Image (tube, rainbow, N blue to C red):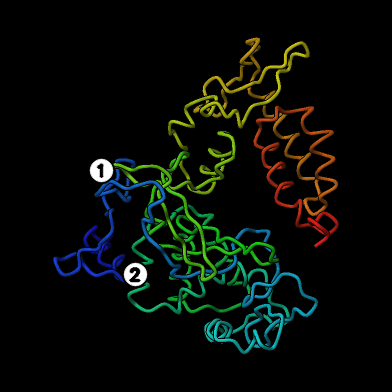
Amino acid sequence: MVSIEQLSLMINQHLGLLTCTDDAPNCMKWKIFESPLGGRGLVATEDIKTGEVLFIDHPLVYGPRSGTIIQRGCTVCKNIDSDTFYKCSKCALLLCSEQCQNSGIHLSDCSVISCWPNKVSIEDVDDTVLSRALTAIRALLLNEDQKNLLTSLQAHILHQHGSEIRALKEYFDIFEQDEEFMTLVTCILDANAFQMATPYGKKEMNLRGLYPVSSLMNHNCVSNTRYSFNSESQMTVRAVKPISAGTELFTCYSGMLWGTPARRLHLYKTKHFLCVCERCSDPTERGTLLAALKCFSTECSGSLLPIEPLKSNSAWRCLDCGLRVPFLNITTIQNALGSLMGCLNFDNIYELEKFFLNRITKYIPKTNQIVVDLQCRLIWEFGESEGLRWEGE
Protein backbone atom coordinates (compact mmCIF):
# COMPACT_ATOMS: atom_id res chain seq x y z
CA MET A 1 0.00 0.00 0.00
CA VAL A 2 1.34 3.45 -0.88
CA SER A 3 1.92 5.96 1.90
CA ILE A 4 -0.43 8.88 2.51
CA GLU A 5 2.33 11.22 1.30
CA GLN A 6 2.69 9.30 -1.99
CA LEU A 7 -1.08 9.13 -2.46
CA SER A 8 -1.42 12.86 -1.76
CA LEU A 9 1.11 13.62 -4.50
CA MET A 10 -0.76 11.40 -6.96
CA ILE A 11 -4.10 13.03 -6.04
CA ASN A 12 -2.63 16.52 -6.49
CA GLN A 13 -1.32 15.48 -9.90
CA HIS A 14 -4.72 14.03 -10.81
CA LEU A 15 -6.45 17.29 -9.84
CA GLY A 16 -3.78 19.39 -11.54
CA LEU A 17 -2.75 21.02 -8.25
CA LEU A 18 0.63 22.38 -7.29
CA THR A 19 2.08 21.48 -3.92
CA CYS A 20 1.17 24.23 -1.45
CA THR A 21 4.00 26.74 -1.13
CA ASP A 22 4.32 30.47 -0.47
CA ASP A 23 4.22 30.90 -4.26
CA ALA A 24 1.14 28.69 -4.67
CA PRO A 25 -0.95 29.02 -1.50
CA ASN A 26 -4.35 28.12 -3.03
CA CYS A 27 -4.47 24.50 -1.97
CA MET A 28 -7.46 22.51 -0.76
CA LYS A 29 -9.06 22.85 2.67
CA TRP A 30 -8.71 19.12 3.27
CA LYS A 31 -6.09 16.39 3.32
CA ILE A 32 -5.88 12.62 3.21
CA PHE A 33 -5.54 10.99 6.64
CA GLU A 34 -5.85 7.69 8.48
CA SER A 35 -9.54 7.60 9.36
CA PRO A 36 -10.66 6.31 12.78
CA LEU A 37 -13.24 4.31 10.81
CA GLY A 38 -10.39 2.28 9.32
CA GLY A 39 -8.40 2.90 6.16
CA ARG A 40 -7.97 6.34 4.65
CA GLY A 41 -10.33 9.28 4.42
CA LEU A 42 -10.45 13.03 3.90
CA VAL A 43 -10.40 15.50 6.78
CA ALA A 44 -10.99 19.26 6.78
CA THR A 45 -7.86 21.28 7.52
CA GLU A 46 -9.79 24.58 7.74
CA ASP A 47 -13.35 25.59 8.54
CA ILE A 48 -15.58 25.09 5.48
CA LYS A 49 -18.79 27.00 4.75
CA THR A 50 -22.09 25.53 3.54
CA GLY A 51 -22.13 25.32 -0.26
CA GLU A 52 -18.36 25.70 -0.59
CA VAL A 53 -16.79 23.63 -3.39
CA LEU A 54 -14.34 21.14 -1.89
CA PHE A 55 -12.97 19.81 -5.17
CA ILE A 56 -13.89 19.00 -8.77
CA ASP A 57 -13.00 15.41 -9.63
CA HIS A 58 -12.89 13.67 -13.00
CA PRO A 59 -13.03 9.95 -13.73
CA LEU A 60 -9.85 8.00 -14.25
CA VAL A 61 -11.95 5.53 -16.21
CA TYR A 62 -15.66 5.04 -16.87
CA GLY A 63 -18.02 2.71 -18.69
CA PRO A 64 -21.29 0.77 -18.44
CA ARG A 65 -22.38 -0.51 -15.05
CA SER A 66 -21.51 -4.13 -14.37
CA GLY A 67 -24.70 -5.59 -12.90
CA THR A 68 -25.89 -8.95 -14.18
CA ILE A 69 -28.87 -7.13 -15.71
CA ILE A 70 -27.66 -4.14 -17.71
CA GLN A 71 -29.09 -1.86 -20.35
CA ARG A 72 -28.11 -2.83 -23.88
CA GLY A 73 -26.83 0.19 -25.78
CA CYS A 74 -24.14 1.80 -27.90
CA THR A 75 -20.77 1.65 -26.14
CA VAL A 76 -19.76 5.02 -27.60
CA CYS A 77 -22.74 7.42 -27.48
CA LYS A 78 -24.53 5.39 -24.74
CA ASN A 79 -27.79 5.47 -26.73
CA ILE A 80 -30.25 2.74 -25.68
CA ASP A 81 -33.07 3.81 -28.00
CA SER A 82 -32.03 2.71 -31.48
CA ASP A 83 -33.17 0.28 -34.17
CA THR A 84 -29.71 0.15 -35.74
CA PHE A 85 -27.57 -1.61 -33.12
CA TYR A 86 -24.90 -3.91 -34.54
CA LYS A 87 -21.69 -5.57 -33.37
CA CYS A 88 -18.26 -4.41 -34.45
CA SER A 89 -16.83 -7.13 -36.72
CA LYS A 90 -13.45 -6.92 -34.96
CA CYS A 91 -14.31 -6.73 -31.24
CA ALA A 92 -18.09 -7.44 -30.93
CA LEU A 93 -18.80 -4.21 -29.00
CA LEU A 94 -22.29 -2.89 -29.63
CA LEU A 95 -22.60 0.24 -31.79
CA CYS A 96 -25.43 2.26 -33.29
CA SER A 97 -23.80 4.06 -36.25
CA GLU A 98 -20.77 4.27 -38.50
CA GLN A 99 -19.89 7.55 -36.80
CA CYS A 100 -19.65 5.79 -33.43
CA GLN A 101 -17.64 2.96 -34.99
CA ASN A 102 -15.08 5.43 -36.38
CA SER A 103 -14.85 7.45 -33.15
CA GLY A 104 -11.67 7.63 -31.08
CA ILE A 105 -13.46 6.00 -28.14
CA HIS A 106 -14.34 2.89 -30.12
CA LEU A 107 -11.02 2.65 -31.93
CA SER A 108 -9.25 2.64 -28.56
CA ASP A 109 -11.61 0.00 -27.08
CA CYS A 110 -11.35 -2.10 -30.21
CA SER A 111 -7.54 -1.93 -30.27
CA VAL A 112 -7.41 -3.74 -26.93
CA ILE A 113 -10.10 -6.37 -27.51
CA SER A 114 -9.14 -7.25 -31.08
CA CYS A 115 -5.62 -8.19 -29.89
CA TRP A 116 -7.01 -11.13 -27.90
CA PRO A 117 -7.44 -14.40 -29.83
CA ASN A 118 -11.09 -15.43 -30.12
CA LYS A 119 -12.36 -18.65 -28.56
CA VAL A 120 -15.62 -18.33 -30.55
CA SER A 121 -16.60 -16.42 -33.66
CA ILE A 122 -17.18 -12.68 -33.18
CA GLU A 123 -20.86 -13.18 -34.03
CA ASP A 124 -21.21 -15.53 -31.06
CA VAL A 125 -19.63 -13.18 -28.50
CA ASP A 126 -22.19 -11.96 -25.94
CA ASP A 127 -22.08 -8.16 -26.24
CA THR A 128 -23.61 -7.74 -22.77
CA VAL A 129 -20.65 -9.61 -21.24
CA LEU A 130 -18.31 -7.27 -23.09
CA SER A 131 -20.27 -4.27 -21.91
CA ARG A 132 -20.04 -5.39 -18.27
CA ALA A 133 -16.25 -5.67 -18.57
CA LEU A 134 -15.70 -2.55 -20.67
CA THR A 135 -14.70 -0.21 -17.82
CA ALA A 136 -11.94 -2.61 -16.76
CA ILE A 137 -10.89 -3.05 -20.40
CA ARG A 138 -10.53 0.71 -20.74
CA ALA A 139 -8.25 0.78 -17.69
CA LEU A 140 -5.65 -1.04 -19.82
CA LEU A 141 -5.34 2.18 -21.85
CA LEU A 142 -4.33 4.34 -18.87
CA ASN A 143 -0.77 5.63 -18.61
CA GLU A 144 1.54 4.43 -15.84
CA ASP A 145 0.83 7.35 -13.49
CA GLN A 146 -2.91 6.79 -13.86
CA LYS A 147 -2.54 3.05 -13.28
CA ASN A 148 -0.48 3.71 -10.15
CA LEU A 149 -3.21 5.98 -8.79
CA LEU A 150 -5.92 3.47 -9.64
CA THR A 151 -4.15 0.54 -7.98
CA SER A 152 -3.46 2.60 -4.84
CA LEU A 153 -7.19 2.60 -4.08
CA GLN A 154 -8.93 0.05 -1.88
CA ALA A 155 -10.07 -3.18 -3.55
CA HIS A 156 -12.63 -5.78 -2.52
CA ILE A 157 -11.21 -9.28 -2.09
CA LEU A 158 -14.26 -11.57 -2.02
CA HIS A 159 -14.64 -14.08 -4.86
CA GLN A 160 -17.82 -12.58 -6.34
CA HIS A 161 -15.83 -9.55 -7.50
CA GLY A 162 -14.19 -9.95 -10.89
CA SER A 163 -16.98 -12.13 -12.30
CA GLU A 164 -17.21 -9.98 -15.45
CA ILE A 165 -13.61 -10.86 -16.36
CA ARG A 166 -14.18 -14.56 -15.71
CA ALA A 167 -17.22 -14.39 -18.00
CA LEU A 168 -15.19 -12.58 -20.67
CA LYS A 169 -12.66 -15.45 -20.74
CA GLU A 170 -15.33 -17.70 -22.25
CA TYR A 171 -15.04 -15.71 -25.47
CA PHE A 172 -11.42 -14.50 -25.61
CA ASP A 173 -7.99 -15.92 -24.81
CA ILE A 174 -6.97 -12.96 -22.67
CA PHE A 175 -3.29 -12.34 -22.01
CA GLU A 176 -2.44 -13.32 -18.43
CA GLN A 177 -1.09 -9.88 -17.51
CA ASP A 178 -4.23 -8.21 -18.88
CA GLU A 179 -6.48 -10.65 -17.03
CA GLU A 180 -4.75 -10.05 -13.68
CA PHE A 181 -4.87 -6.28 -14.07
CA MET A 182 -8.50 -6.17 -15.20
CA THR A 183 -9.57 -8.46 -12.34
CA LEU A 184 -7.87 -6.11 -9.88
CA VAL A 185 -9.56 -3.14 -11.57
CA THR A 186 -13.02 -4.70 -11.21
CA CYS A 187 -12.36 -5.26 -7.49
CA ILE A 188 -11.30 -1.61 -7.16
CA LEU A 189 -14.31 -0.40 -9.17
CA ASP A 190 -16.74 -2.38 -7.02
CA ALA A 191 -15.25 -0.77 -3.91
CA ASN A 192 -14.99 2.79 -5.21
CA ALA A 193 -16.93 3.59 -8.40
CA PHE A 194 -19.87 6.02 -8.48
CA GLN A 195 -22.96 5.76 -10.64
CA MET A 196 -22.80 8.63 -13.11
CA ALA A 197 -25.90 10.77 -13.61
CA THR A 198 -27.80 10.50 -16.89
CA PRO A 199 -28.53 13.88 -18.54
CA TYR A 200 -32.12 14.94 -17.89
CA GLY A 201 -34.54 13.68 -20.54
CA LYS A 202 -31.99 11.46 -22.32
CA LYS A 203 -32.30 7.71 -22.73
CA GLU A 204 -28.78 6.54 -22.10
CA MET A 205 -26.96 3.57 -20.60
CA ASN A 206 -26.24 3.74 -16.89
CA LEU A 207 -22.54 4.40 -16.39
CA ARG A 208 -20.11 4.09 -13.51
CA GLY A 209 -16.96 6.14 -13.10
CA LEU A 210 -13.90 5.86 -10.89
CA TYR A 211 -13.44 9.26 -9.24
CA PRO A 212 -10.27 8.79 -7.18
CA VAL A 213 -10.59 11.80 -4.85
CA SER A 214 -14.28 11.19 -4.13
CA SER A 215 -13.58 7.49 -3.56
CA LEU A 216 -11.38 8.41 -0.58
CA MET A 217 -14.37 9.80 1.33
CA ASN A 218 -15.88 7.39 3.83
CA HIS A 219 -19.61 6.74 4.20
CA ASN A 220 -22.14 8.29 6.53
CA CYS A 221 -25.92 8.06 6.10
CA VAL A 222 -26.08 11.78 6.96
CA SER A 223 -23.15 12.98 4.89
CA ASN A 224 -21.71 16.48 5.16
CA THR A 225 -21.09 16.73 1.40
CA ARG A 226 -23.05 16.25 -1.80
CA TYR A 227 -21.94 15.77 -5.38
CA SER A 228 -23.25 16.65 -8.83
CA PHE A 229 -22.13 16.03 -12.40
CA ASN A 230 -21.68 18.40 -15.34
CA SER A 231 -21.92 17.68 -19.07
CA GLU A 232 -18.25 16.69 -19.14
CA SER A 233 -18.74 13.98 -16.48
CA GLN A 234 -16.85 16.01 -13.88
CA MET A 235 -18.00 15.55 -10.28
CA THR A 236 -18.29 18.66 -8.14
CA VAL A 237 -18.28 17.98 -4.39
CA ARG A 238 -19.72 20.66 -2.08
CA ALA A 239 -20.28 21.00 1.65
CA VAL A 240 -23.95 20.75 2.68
CA LYS A 241 -23.35 22.16 6.17
CA PRO A 242 -20.61 24.06 7.97
CA ILE A 243 -17.66 21.72 8.50
CA SER A 244 -15.17 22.51 11.25
CA ALA A 245 -11.44 21.96 10.84
CA GLY A 246 -10.55 18.45 11.98
CA THR A 247 -13.91 16.97 10.89
CA GLU A 248 -13.91 14.04 8.47
CA LEU A 249 -15.58 14.59 5.09
CA PHE A 250 -18.31 12.05 4.35
CA THR A 251 -20.35 11.02 1.36
CA CYS A 252 -23.28 8.58 1.20
CA TYR A 253 -22.86 5.24 -0.60
CA SER A 254 -26.60 4.46 -0.58
CA GLY A 255 -29.88 6.16 -1.40
CA MET A 256 -30.45 9.10 0.93
CA LEU A 257 -34.22 8.48 0.90
CA TRP A 258 -33.96 4.77 1.66
CA GLY A 259 -34.99 3.46 5.06
CA THR A 260 -32.39 1.99 7.41
CA PRO A 261 -32.99 -1.72 6.58
CA ALA A 262 -32.64 -1.01 2.84
CA ARG A 263 -29.52 1.13 3.28
CA ARG A 264 -27.76 -1.31 5.58
CA LEU A 265 -28.57 -4.30 3.34
CA HIS A 266 -27.27 -2.44 0.27
CA LEU A 267 -24.06 -1.45 2.07
CA TYR A 268 -23.53 -5.00 3.31
CA LYS A 269 -24.02 -6.54 -0.12
CA THR A 270 -22.00 -4.01 -2.10
CA LYS A 271 -19.42 -2.61 0.33
CA HIS A 272 -19.29 -5.44 2.89
CA PHE A 273 -19.92 -3.47 6.06
CA LEU A 274 -22.90 -2.73 8.28
CA CYS A 275 -23.33 0.97 9.00
CA VAL A 276 -23.68 1.96 12.66
CA CYS A 277 -23.96 5.73 12.16
CA GLU A 278 -26.24 7.97 14.23
CA ARG A 279 -29.05 7.74 11.68
CA CYS A 280 -28.93 3.94 11.48
CA SER A 281 -28.97 3.75 15.29
CA ASP A 282 -32.15 5.85 15.53
CA PRO A 283 -35.34 3.78 14.93
CA THR A 284 -37.18 6.90 13.71
CA GLU A 285 -34.29 8.08 11.45
CA ARG A 286 -34.49 11.59 12.90
CA GLY A 287 -38.26 11.52 12.75
CA THR A 288 -38.51 10.70 9.04
CA LEU A 289 -39.93 7.16 9.59
CA LEU A 290 -38.68 6.12 6.13
CA ALA A 291 -38.76 2.41 7.00
CA ALA A 292 -42.07 2.47 8.89
CA LEU A 293 -44.87 -0.03 8.26
CA LYS A 294 -48.51 0.31 9.30
CA CYS A 295 -49.43 -1.20 12.64
CA PHE A 296 -50.88 -4.71 12.30
CA SER A 297 -53.72 -3.81 14.67
CA THR A 298 -56.80 -2.70 12.71
CA GLU A 299 -57.76 -0.43 15.60
CA CYS A 300 -54.45 1.48 15.52
CA SER A 301 -53.19 4.01 12.97
CA GLY A 302 -49.63 3.98 14.34
CA SER A 303 -46.35 3.04 12.67
CA LEU A 304 -44.16 0.00 13.24
CA LEU A 305 -40.40 0.53 13.58
CA PRO A 306 -37.49 -1.76 14.57
CA ILE A 307 -36.81 -1.87 18.30
CA GLU A 308 -33.06 -2.40 17.76
CA PRO A 309 -32.33 -1.07 14.26
CA LEU A 310 -28.67 -2.21 14.30
CA LYS A 311 -29.82 -5.84 14.65
CA SER A 312 -30.99 -7.23 11.31
CA ASN A 313 -33.38 -9.67 13.05
CA SER A 314 -34.86 -7.15 15.50
CA ALA A 315 -38.54 -7.30 16.40
CA TRP A 316 -40.60 -4.20 15.54
CA ARG A 317 -42.92 -2.20 17.77
CA CYS A 318 -45.78 0.23 17.12
CA LEU A 319 -45.01 3.78 18.23
CA ASP A 320 -48.65 4.32 19.27
CA CYS A 321 -50.06 1.12 20.78
CA GLY A 322 -46.82 -0.69 21.57
CA LEU A 323 -47.75 -3.83 19.59
CA ARG A 324 -44.64 -6.01 19.17
CA VAL A 325 -44.22 -7.84 15.84
CA PRO A 326 -41.62 -10.62 15.23
CA PHE A 327 -38.99 -10.05 12.58
CA LEU A 328 -40.26 -12.90 10.34
CA ASN A 329 -43.67 -11.21 10.02
CA ILE A 330 -41.93 -7.96 9.04
CA THR A 331 -39.85 -9.80 6.43
CA THR A 332 -43.01 -11.29 4.90
CA ILE A 333 -44.53 -7.81 4.50
CA GLN A 334 -41.31 -6.37 3.07
CA ASN A 335 -41.01 -9.20 0.53
CA ALA A 336 -44.64 -8.73 -0.50
CA LEU A 337 -44.03 -5.00 -1.01
CA GLY A 338 -40.96 -5.80 -3.11
CA SER A 339 -42.99 -8.15 -5.32
CA LEU A 340 -45.71 -5.53 -5.64
CA MET A 341 -43.21 -2.90 -6.78
CA GLY A 342 -41.60 -5.39 -9.16
CA CYS A 343 -44.88 -5.73 -11.06
CA LEU A 344 -45.16 -1.99 -11.72
CA ASN A 345 -44.58 -0.47 -15.13
CA PHE A 346 -42.59 2.65 -14.23
CA ASP A 347 -42.92 3.97 -17.79
CA ASN A 348 -46.71 4.21 -17.42
CA ILE A 349 -47.34 7.42 -15.49
CA TYR A 350 -51.10 6.77 -15.25
CA GLU A 351 -50.54 3.32 -13.73
CA LEU A 352 -48.08 4.79 -11.23
CA GLU A 353 -50.53 7.50 -10.19
CA LYS A 354 -53.37 4.99 -9.78
CA PHE A 355 -51.12 2.67 -7.75
CA PHE A 356 -50.00 5.56 -5.56
CA LEU A 357 -53.48 6.97 -4.91
CA ASN A 358 -55.49 3.76 -4.58
CA ARG A 359 -53.22 0.92 -3.44
CA ILE A 360 -49.85 1.44 -1.82
CA THR A 361 -50.92 3.74 1.02
CA LYS A 362 -53.35 1.07 2.19
CA TYR A 363 -50.37 -1.02 3.26
CA ILE A 364 -47.68 1.42 4.35
CA PRO A 365 -47.54 4.90 5.92
CA LYS A 366 -47.02 7.95 3.72
CA THR A 367 -43.58 8.37 5.29
CA ASN A 368 -42.33 5.02 3.93
CA GLN A 369 -39.50 5.16 1.36
CA ILE A 370 -41.66 3.49 -1.29
CA VAL A 371 -44.31 6.22 -1.06
CA VAL A 372 -41.62 8.92 -1.06
CA ASP A 373 -39.98 7.34 -4.13
CA LEU A 374 -43.28 7.17 -6.00
CA GLN A 375 -44.02 10.80 -5.15
CA CYS A 376 -40.61 11.82 -6.51
CA ARG A 377 -41.18 9.82 -9.71
CA LEU A 378 -44.62 11.39 -10.24
CA ILE A 379 -43.30 14.91 -9.63
CA TRP A 380 -40.47 14.20 -12.07
CA GLU A 381 -42.83 12.99 -14.82
CA PHE A 382 -45.66 15.52 -14.54
CA GLY A 383 -45.05 18.31 -17.00
CA GLU A 384 -42.60 16.21 -19.01
CA SER A 385 -44.51 13.11 -20.17
CA GLU A 386 -46.51 12.98 -23.40
CA GLY A 387 -50.03 14.27 -22.74
CA LEU A 388 -49.04 15.77 -19.39
CA ARG A 389 -46.83 18.63 -20.52
CA TRP A 390 -47.50 22.13 -19.28
CA GLU A 391 -49.38 24.28 -21.82
CA GLY A 392 -49.25 21.45 -24.35
CA GLU A 393 -45.57 21.91 -25.13
Secondary structure beneath label 2? helix
Q: Quadrant of residue 110?
A: bottom right
Label placed on residue 246: 1
According to the picture, the residue beneath numbered tag 2 turns out to be 14
Q: Is residue 120 left or right of residue 387?
A: left
Tell me which corner region of the image, top left, top right, bottom left or bottom right, holds residue 164: bottom right
* Amino acid carrying mark 1 in the image: Gly
Q: Does residue 331 lie above or below 235 as drawn?
A: above
What's the residue at 47%, 54% (across, down)?
227
Residue 376 in the image: state x and y as whole percent: 68, 45
Determine the residue positioned at 57% across, 26% down.
313
> Along the line of sight, which residue is nearer the eye, 159 or 390?
390
Taking 54 as reference, is 87 left or right?
A: right
Q: CA distance from mark 2 to mark 1?
A: 24 Å
Amino acid carrying label 2: it is His
Q: In the image shown, does 129 or 360 lie closer to the viewer?
A: 360
Image position of 191 with respect to 60: above or below: above
Q: Quadrant of the N terminus?
A: bottom left
Quarter placement of the C terminus: bottom right
